Image (cartoon, rainbow, N blue to C red):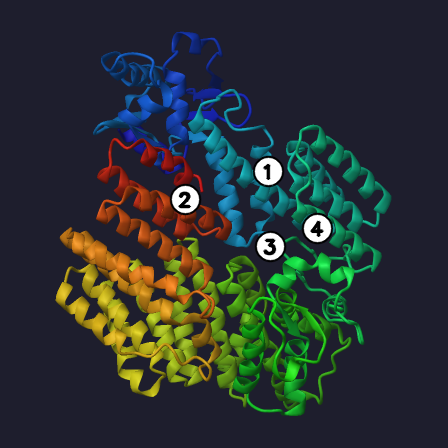
């Protein structure tokens, strides 16, 4: 055992398994070298190979015997014979690997040793990709991690000879992760001016995914950005012919994307690499991304006198998708740029103007109203992305002294600079609230991180704009906290909330401080520190008389949640009653951070959550019924303002749990399918974690139900 502990400390594995490309198992020899098991050995150890592969692909490398029988040897022999297969296979794996400790019997199943003992290339590649995400995907800091993942992914497809359903499901998920890693690396190479590496990476992606239309479009866009229009069209034509031969015509969305690329290239608006600057235009989920661009402002803002959406034109028809989301007046871009210079009012007044215009643009195809009705219009999503990115663009222009002149010099000039920049940042923060509610976590995180350090610096320096900078910086940390939460980084989430609380105190704004305290309370709740969670809410409760009544719902439902978690049902229900006395209906005069992050959906979600916590403690069906009644109220909000996508999906998952508690299998299956698709689209590990937890509860509730077992592939690899 002493030798075993030393191996753990040094990180030396005993076994290496290559699952990407040809399946190879290597054993470490006494001298530290590696020796591969001969391929013919699997003819003797026939049962051991699929067991080893299945456990390596399982979540936590652990599975029950019953699941192994269904996955590896379905319907082959009578049950008595089938029961011997896992036992025989386990014996063969132990003999091959040379250590019984590497495969343990746990209850009615098997547990394979982790990555420290049995190293697998696919787990290593996924770890590198996770590290790249932690550093910021498509940032320079992530380059070594992406390169590490790429070296492993290039070996080939996962378990390419294995055709079982479980292997196909995991293989497709890994292929999706490999695609994300490869694409991020290609774009990073391109942005950093490493054009040879970028071209090779785009080519490799297309070779690996010849029948994936996204791969074809990425290569097409790459050649257009290099100014190679003819080559780009040849690549596109050949790719379309290949797709048509396989009966895979280009989707309408992809065709629309091709038309956009052509239009942008013709107008010279498709940015090419300029030093370390590149602007990407992406499809339905993407848009303008500016990275330190001196000329980005000229590309981002509409040209003078340009009619962006002329009525009845072909361009309007081609932008039908954007039109479905509404459009905004260009004033939302001009207000932040001119507000400080003209001294038009407080930042709060400007934020309210922008918020009103953006909220009106959520209404599908409704005519514009108010002061922006007669001005130029542009698609809502474009407006949001340009507005969010304005600080990045202006800071870049200011650093080289082009296009944006700072008045005065010295301390007076610095004060003037803050007066002019803070409205631009306030506009960006307002746009980021809308992007966050539409599920754009990475876009918001990347945008806010670019100017948050400067805001924090200004928040600590005495000046006329100190409190405004502190308030904006606190909201910036709200965004970073939300991203950390959806990545399950609860410690990082807490650190961001602590920074937000400190900045809220500097801002001297009671409503903002209460908002920050409710967030940090939830962070402590996630970390099971219920005492600190309670103390934060007690401080928030003392401030409620100075804040809008909408915050009463958040504070009291938070207290109810803590009580329910600890099994104090009466106290939890009393706090819920107090929460219902709050008023979430008045939104118009509230600060933007309350309009965007509070609403009637908050009470609906929290009430259902509290009931589910009580159900876990008491196991009473009445709590599950009450949870479903509460959560079902979300359906009544249709048409009464947008419910954030992350909240809608969480409510779906909570309703799935309530369905389990009520014994409603059909409802559980329906909610799970919807939730899995939404979690995949949102890219939220937290929403996926909720699905997995529900699935495990469902296995306990319906242990022999085939539909529940089949859902495992959906939720585990979402």
Q: How many other residues sit within 10 Å of disc 1, few (<14), some (14-19) or many (≥20)?
A: many
Q: Mark number for residue 212?
A: none
Q: List the residue tagged with mark 3.
A: 285
| Residue 220, image x, y percentages | 75, 44
Judged from the image, the secondary structure of the residue bearing numbered disc 2 is helix
Q: Is residue 453 visible?
A: no
Name which residue lies at 32% across and 59% down: 632
Image position of 673 with respect to 290: above or below: above
Discs 3, 1 touching: Cβ within 8 Å? no
Q: CA distance from mark 3 to mark 1?
A: 24 Å
Is residue 433 toward the left or the right of residue 50 in the image? right
Residue 265 at x, y percent in the picture: 81, 55
Q: Is residue 303 left or right of residue 653?
A: right
> Quadrant location of the N terminus?
top left
The residue wearing badge 1 is 150
Marks 3 and 4 sit apart, C-alpha to C-alpha, by: 11 Å
């Amino acid at each position: 055992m002493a030798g075993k502990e030393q191996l753990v400390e040094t990180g030396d594995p005993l076994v290496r398994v290559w699952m990407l490309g040809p399946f190879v198992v290597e054993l470490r020899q006494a001298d530290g070298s590696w020796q591969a098991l001969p391929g013919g050995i699997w003819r003797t150890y026939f049962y051991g190979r699929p067991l080893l592969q299945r456990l390596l692909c399982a979540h936590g490398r652990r599975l029950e015997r019953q699941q192994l029988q269904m996955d590896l040897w379905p319907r082959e022999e009578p049950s008595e014979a089938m029961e011997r297969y896992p036992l025989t296979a386990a014996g063969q794996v132990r003999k091959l690997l040379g250590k019984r400790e590497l495969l343990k019997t746990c209850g009615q199943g098997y547990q394979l040793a982790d990555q420290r003992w049995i190293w697998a290339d696919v787990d290593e590649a996924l770890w590198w990709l996770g590290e790249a995400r932690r550093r910021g995907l498509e940032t320079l800091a992530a380059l070594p991690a992406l390169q590490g993942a790429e070296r492993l992914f290039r070996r080939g497809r996962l378990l390419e000879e294995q055709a079982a359903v479980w292997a196909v499901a995991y293989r497709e998920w890994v292929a999706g992760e490999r695609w994300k890693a490869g694409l991020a690396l290609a774009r990073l190479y391109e942005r950093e001016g490493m054009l040879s590496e970028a071209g090779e990476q785009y080519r490799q992606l297309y070779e690996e995914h010849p029948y994936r239309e996204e791969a074809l479009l990425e290569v097409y866009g790459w050649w257009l950005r290099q100014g190679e229009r003819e080559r780009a069209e040849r690549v596109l034509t050949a790719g379309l012919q290949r797709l048509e031969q396989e009966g895979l015509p280009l989707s309408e969305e992809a065709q629309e994307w091709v038309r956009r690329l052509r239009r942008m290239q013709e107008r010279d608006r498709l940015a090419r690499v300029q030093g370390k600057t590149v602007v990407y235009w992406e499809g339905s989920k993407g848009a303008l991304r500016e990275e330190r661009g001196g000329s980005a402002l000229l590309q981002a803002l509409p040209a003078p006198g340009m009619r962006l959406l002329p009525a009845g034109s072909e361009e309007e028809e081609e932008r039908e998708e954007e039109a479905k989301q509404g459009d905004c007046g260009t004033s939302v871009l001009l207000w932040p740029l001119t507000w400080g210079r003209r001294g038009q009012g407080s930042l709060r007044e400007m934020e309210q103007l922008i918020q009103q215009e953006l909220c009106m643009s959520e209404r599908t195809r409704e005519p514009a109203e108010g002061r922006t009705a007669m001005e130029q219009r542009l698609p809502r999503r474009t407006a949001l992305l340009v507005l969010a990115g304005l600080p990045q663009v202006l800071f870049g222009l200011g650093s080289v002294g082009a296009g944006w002149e700072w008045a005065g010099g010295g301390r007076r000039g610095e004060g003037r600079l803050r007066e002019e920049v803070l409205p631009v940042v306030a506009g960006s923060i307002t746009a980021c609230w809308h992007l966050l509610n539409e599920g754009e976590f990475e876009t918001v995180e990347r945008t806010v991180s670019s100017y948050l350090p400067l805001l924090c610096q200004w928040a600590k320096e005495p000046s006329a704009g100190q409190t405004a900078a502190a308030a904006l910086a606190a909201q910036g940390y709200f965004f970073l906290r939300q991203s950390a939460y959806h990545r399950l980084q609860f410690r990082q989430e807490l650190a961001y909330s602590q920074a937000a609380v400190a900045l809220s105190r500097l801002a001297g704004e009671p409503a903002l401080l209460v908002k920050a305290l409710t967030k940090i309370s939830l962070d402590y709740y996630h970390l099971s520190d219920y005492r600190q969670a309670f103390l934060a809410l007690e401080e928030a409760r003392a401030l409620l008389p100075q804040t809008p009544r909408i915050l009463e719902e958040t504070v009291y439902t938070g207290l109810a949640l803590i009580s329910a978690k600890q099994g104090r049902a009466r106290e939890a229900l009393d706090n819920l009653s107090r929460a219902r006395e709050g008023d979430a209906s008045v939104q118009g005069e509230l600060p933007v951070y309350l309009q965007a992050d509070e609403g009637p959906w908050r009470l609906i979600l929290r009430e259902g959550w509290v009931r589910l916590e009580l159900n876990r403690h008491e196991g009473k069906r009445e709590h599950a019924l009450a949870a479903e009644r509460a959560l079902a109220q979300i359906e009544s909000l249709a048409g009464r303002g947008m419910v954030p996508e992350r909240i809608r999906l969480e409510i779906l998952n909570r309703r799935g749990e309530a369905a389990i508690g009520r014994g409603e299998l059909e409802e559980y299956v329906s909610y799970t399918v919807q939730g899995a698709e939404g979690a995949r689209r949102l890219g939220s590990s937290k929403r996926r974690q909720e699905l997995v937890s529900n699935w495990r509860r469902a296995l306990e509730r319906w242990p022999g139900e085939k539909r529940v077992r089949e859902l495992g592939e959906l939720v585990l690899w979402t």
